[in-house]
Image: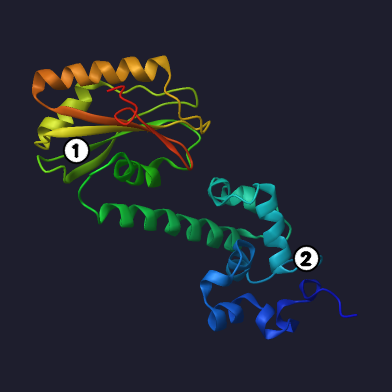
């Protein structure tokens, strides 16, 4: 019986089993995540093919590409067969994917739902170990003026200064804003601090005739909307 093809160098695999050839013949959608990473690294090590090495790396992050994107170049170089150049290729590819999300979201230009706001915040907040506070500045038609960072903090929380928020809103002639921040724990339930801060910012906006339309708490694959839940 023939041995598993993944135990041999990729160059000796049947054509349909080679990730590059498989992509060219059958299209990118049929490749597994491990096969796509194998194309990036090109070769494995003395014990593992490129695909097997990629499978090991993915297994260590629970087959989650968002968790993979959190690994640094140094983290990746801990794997036998992954040198600096290969690690940089993986990090660069994941960063391009992240920027693609941002480009897709920005092309919409107008915010019509909490999902739109989440999609705009996600590329900036999805793979952070600490919290960041951002806001969308909108005109009277809810078209996006700016997507700005207004505060960073640690793992347990962040601080957003209402004075800074509305100074920026006034500078850009915004009619309304949407707040957003991430919870690195992926638990998107608002804390008491989140709720009190949101109410404080909303009250400040009322005095300046700048509406606070929503506050989005971003997780890796889900979100909480203060507006949808009737909290704001």
Measuring 45% from the left and 55% from the top, which residue is drawn there? Answer: 95
Q: Report helix, strand or loop for mark 2.
A: loop
**Residue 9 relative to residue 86: left or right:** right
Q: Report whether 159 appears left or right of 5.
A: left
**Gap between marks 2 and 1, in whole Å?**
50 Å
- Left or right for 151, reference 23: left
Residue at 43% across, 59% down: 96
Tell me: residue 44, above or below residue 118.
Answer: below
Residue at 38%, 16% (x, y): give it.
Answer: 193
Numbered mark located on residue 83 in the image: none
The residue carrying mark 1 is: 137
Give the foreground label among 2 and 1.
1
Give the residue displayed 77% in from the left and 65% down from the top.
48
Q: Quadrant of residue 213?
A: top left
- For marks 2 and 1, the one nearer the N-term is 2
Nearest the viewer among 115 and 177 is: 115
Q: Is residue 21 visible?
A: yes
For numbered disc 1, what is the local secondary structure? strand
Local crowd size for mark 1, using a 10 Å CA cut-off: few (<14), some (14–19), many (≥20): many
What scheme was used to colour the molecule? rainbow
- x then y, percent, for residue 137: 19, 38
Q: Is 62 above or below relative to 150? A: below
| Residue 176, picture quadrant | top left
- Is there CB contact under 8 Å for labels 2 and 1? no
What is the x, y in percent for residue 55? Answer: 69, 59
Quarter of the image with the N terminus is bottom right
Q: Residues within 10 Å of mark 2 (few under 14, many from 20)?
A: some
* Image spot of residue 203 (x, y percent): 19, 16
Spot occupied by residue 39 in the image (x, y as percentages of width and height): 60, 71
Residue 48, numbered circle: 2
For the question of whether residue 81 can be seen, the reply is no
């Amino acid at each position: 019986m023939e041995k598993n093809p993944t135990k041999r160098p990729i160059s000796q695999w049947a054509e349909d089993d080679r990730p590059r050839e498989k992509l060219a013949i059958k299209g990118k959608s049929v490749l597994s995540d491990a096969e796509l990473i194998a194309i990036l690294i090109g070769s494995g090590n003395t014990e593992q093919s490129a695909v097997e090495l990629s499978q090991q790396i993915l297994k260590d992050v629970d087959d989650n590409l968002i968790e993979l994107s959190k690994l640094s170049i140094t983290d990746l170089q801990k794997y036998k067969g992954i040198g600096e150049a290969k690690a940089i290729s993986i990090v660069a590819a994941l960063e391009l994917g992240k920027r693609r999300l941002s480009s897709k979201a920005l092309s919409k230009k107008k915010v019509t739902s909490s999902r739109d706001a989440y999609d705009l915040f996600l590329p900036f907040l999805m793979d952070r170990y600490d919290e960041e506070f951002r806001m969308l500045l909108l005109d009277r038609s809810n078209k996006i003026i700016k997507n700005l960072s207004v505060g960073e903090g640690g793992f347990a929380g962040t601080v957003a200064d209402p004075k800074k928020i509305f100074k920026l809103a006034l500078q850009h002639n915004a009619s309304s804003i949407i707040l957003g921040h991430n919870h690195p724990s992926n638990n998107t339930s608002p804390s008491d601090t989140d709720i009190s801060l949101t109410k404080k910012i909303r009250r400040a906006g009322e005095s300046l005739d700048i509406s606070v339309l929503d506050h989005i708490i971003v997780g890796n694959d889900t979100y909480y909307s203060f507006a949808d839940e009737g909290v704001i």
